Image: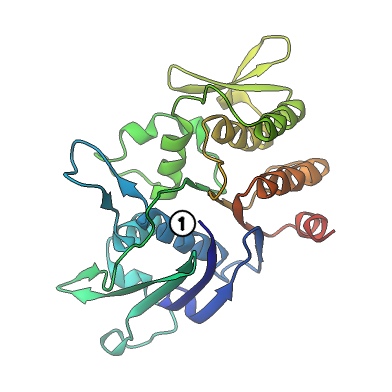
Amino acid sequence: MAISKVSIENFTVFEKIEIDFCDGMNVFIGENGTGKTHLLKIIYAICESLVYLDGPNFDVATPLSFNTRIHECFQAIDYTKLYSSLANNPESREPIMVKAVIDGDEHFYQIRSTNGDAVDTNFEPKLKDSVPVIFIPAKDMLTHARLEKDFMHRNLPFDKTEIDILNKAGISTMKTLPQDLTVILDKIAGIIGGRIVYKSDRYYTEKEDGTLIDFAFEAEGFKKLGLLYRLIETGYFEKGSVLIWDEPEANINPRNIPAIVDLLLDLHKDGVQIFVATHDYFFAKYMDI
């Protein structure tokens, strides 16, 4: 899957914006409040709305609606909270519009009010094959493993992106991985001093001497790299997949920033389309170099 363009109107901080993307690395840089994370969540909601679900609760493969996904990503119970802050009069607001060009096909979403609810219109997903989509939030989530088991029944202060990453990191590992991905795992293990182990609903770093370090006691930067390690070994980074990462530099020692960039470029070379939001000058400059 390749996302080549997104257009947004009347959504949160965006009055009207259109952005073209490349198939490889896309880096968003801006001040606080300019909408970097919102843009990442919109891209994620679009991708997830094109994923088909199969299971006992579905008679046929069923796409999740963009409307459902966008509300979950923003914890927006009242859909009017998604309106652009530049729209003054709620009664005269233009509808929220989102368009995306994916694999050459245009996907169009209009969110409007119907009896206080938001709905999608013109929703006709055209992707025949689902591809993995990963959103890594700025907040560490692996320390909070097991929250995903209660999310559907409790009022927790987390949005769907934060719960989704727990669900995706908590699945079983692949028996075999392509050699290129194995090399990336070895690079991560070299930085954090061991491999990631998931057992009894908890995450650990198994150091080179066999010591298990519970993630509650692990360095924050190592936990972030450990999450990337876990996602690779569970098979989420295949050719055509999408990685969305909010502030990958957060809690990372500056000397490891080049390693983070190199890891992302390695994933890009393996056919992963990447969207990153950052505040970090060193990260952006090293990426530029």
Which of these two is toward me, 247 or 124? 124
> Of helix, strand and loop, which one carries label 1?
helix
Residue 202 in picture, x, y percent from top left: 48, 22
**Label 1 crowd (10 A; few <14 / some 14-19 / many >=20):** many
* Image height of 145 relative to 94, above or below: above
Residue 45 in picture, x, y percent from top left: 41, 58
Which residue of the protein is positioned furthest toward the top in this rendering? 210
Which of these two is toward me, 248 or 125? 125
* Image height of 269 relative to 149, above or below: below
- Left or right: where 173 falls relative to 186: left
* Image height of 168 relative to 87, above or below: above
- Left or right: where 212 falls relative to 190: left
Residue 172 in picture, x, y percent from top left: 46, 24
Which image quarter holds the C terminus? bottom right
Q: Residue at x 56, y 26 (%)?
A: 216
* Image height of 130 relative to 107, above or below: above
Q: Residue at x 39, y 29 (%)?
A: 146
Residue 39 visible (yes or no): yes
What residue is pinned by disc 1? 44
Figure quadrant of residue 72? bottom left
Residue 185 in picture, x, y percent from top left: 68, 30
Q: Residue at x 76, y 54 (%)?
A: 283
Tag 1: residue type? Answer: Tyr
